[in-house]
Image (cartoon, grey):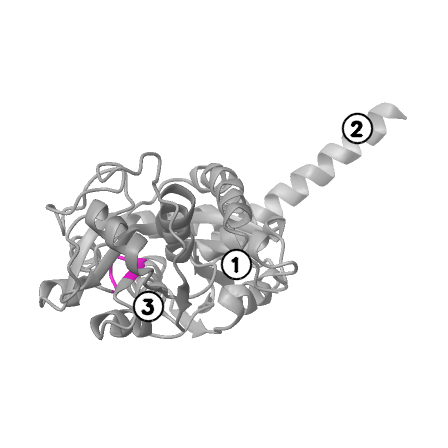
């Protein structure tokens, strides 16, 4: 009897493995939806259209971008969590995915409902000021802020730029600055240009064009090393804030249960897209670093990111609901 059961179990496992391989071999047989849980024209949407288009070309299909913004990225993520794990619905989202499970009491999804595919790109956060604002270094900024207590602009409550700023200003520098939250990076940057407020923290691609035009001045970046786009700007560690290494990253997920063969095919296509010269040039212009790697690399990274941001959320006492 045991031998019969074991043989039956092996047979079922063989059939399931064969079914997964068959699905992987046939996929994609039609266009793939890529859900972006943020508004069009933002950094996440730009990366989706850039990398998604090239990956679709390599896979011989069309990747259709759908923007479903709201609740800090939760609405689109929840849609994908409930989608069929057949390889035809993906999520391309930001590091908000790792933050929101701590920031919201009920974000509408759990991380176990997703299959990590790959981190496409990432960029550090940048502390910047209006061109008319006097400080040129973090030391000067902290000194002036202690005396005047200005507010600072963020692209939204609980975003990684907001949490980076809270770590640096409140937890490390002991400043009691008011975070003024905007509906996205564009609005936050525009406010800082006008000096209302005179300080901002955002993913580097938002303020970068205005830094180049002289309307904004960069103070420090949250990366481990200086960025090639702004080689004269120190890291926060160099500026006296050791241990701060934060990134806004863009990653791709499938619903949990998607066949491994399909996950791997999309992973391979994105990695190939990230090696395309035109893609790399555009990412460089946007101050994004291509990342890539295996699905397991992404899964391992999430195991670091989720508890890291949970700790920051608790320390900053940030809650959305």
The residue that label 1 is drawn on is: 87
Magenta span of residues:
200-206
In the picture, residue 83 is in which quadrant?
bottom right
Tell me which label, 2 or 3, sits earlier in the chain: 2
Q: Is residue 292 above or below residue 147?
A: above
The residue that label 3 is drawn on is: 185
Tell me which label, 1 or 2, sits earlier in the chain: 2
| Residue 276 visible within the image | no
Secondary structure found at label 1 = loop
Marks 2 and 3: CB-CB under 8 Å? no
Magenta segment includes 203: yes
In the picture, residue 105 is in which quadrant?
bottom right
The quarter of the picture where the C terminus appears is bottom right
For image coordinates 63% across by 53% down, the residue present is 110
Pick the residue in front: 47 or 320: 320
Pick the residue in front: 305 or 53: 305
The quarter of the picture where the N terminus appears is top right
CA–CA distance between discs 1 and 2? 31 Å
| Residue 230 visible within the image | yes
Secondary structure found at label 3 = helix
In the rendered image, residue 53, in percent from the top left (x then y), is placed at 31, 65
The residue that label 2 is drawn on is: 6
């Amino acid at each position: 009897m045991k031998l019969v059961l074991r043989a039956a179990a092996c047979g079922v496992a063989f059939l399931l493995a064969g079914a997964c391989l068959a699905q992987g071999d046939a996929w994609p047989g039609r266009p793939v939806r890529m859900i972006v849980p943020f508004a069009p024209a933002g950094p996440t949407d730009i990366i989706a259209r850039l990398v998604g288009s090239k990956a679709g070309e390599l896979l011989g299909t069309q990747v259709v971008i759908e923007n479903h913004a709201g609740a800090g990225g939760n609405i689109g993520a929840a849609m994908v969590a409930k989608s069929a794990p057949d390889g035809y619905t993906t999520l391309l989202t930001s590091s908000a995915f790792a933050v929101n499970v701590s920031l919201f009491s009920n974000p509408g999804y759990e991380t176990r409902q997703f299959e990590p595919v790959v981190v496409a790109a990432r960029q550090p956060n940048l502390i910047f000021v209006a061109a008319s604002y006097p400080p040129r270094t973090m030391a000067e900024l902290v000194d002036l802020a202690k005396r005047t207590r200005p507010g600072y602009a963020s692209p939204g409550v609980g975003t990684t730029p907001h949490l980076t700023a809270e770590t640096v200003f409140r937890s490390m520098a002991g400043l009691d600055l008011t975070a003024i939250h905007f509906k996205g990076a564009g609005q936050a940057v525009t406010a800082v240009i006008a000096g209302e407020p005179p300080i901002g923290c955002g993913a580097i691609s938002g303020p970068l064009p205005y830094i180049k035009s002289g309307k904004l001045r960069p103070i420090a970046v949250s990366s481990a090393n200086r960025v090639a786009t702004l080689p004269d700007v120190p890291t926060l560690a160099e500026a006296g804030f050791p241990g701060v290494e934060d990134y806004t990253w863009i990653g791709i997920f499938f619903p949990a249960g998607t066949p491994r063969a399909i996950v791997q095919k999309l992973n391979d296509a994105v990695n190939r897209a990230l090696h395309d010269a035109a893609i790399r040039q555009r990412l460089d212009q946007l101050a994004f670093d291509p990342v890539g790697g295996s699905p397991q690399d992404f899964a391992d990274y999430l195991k670091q990111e989720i508890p890291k941001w949970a700790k920051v959320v608790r320390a900053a006492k940030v809650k959305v609901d």
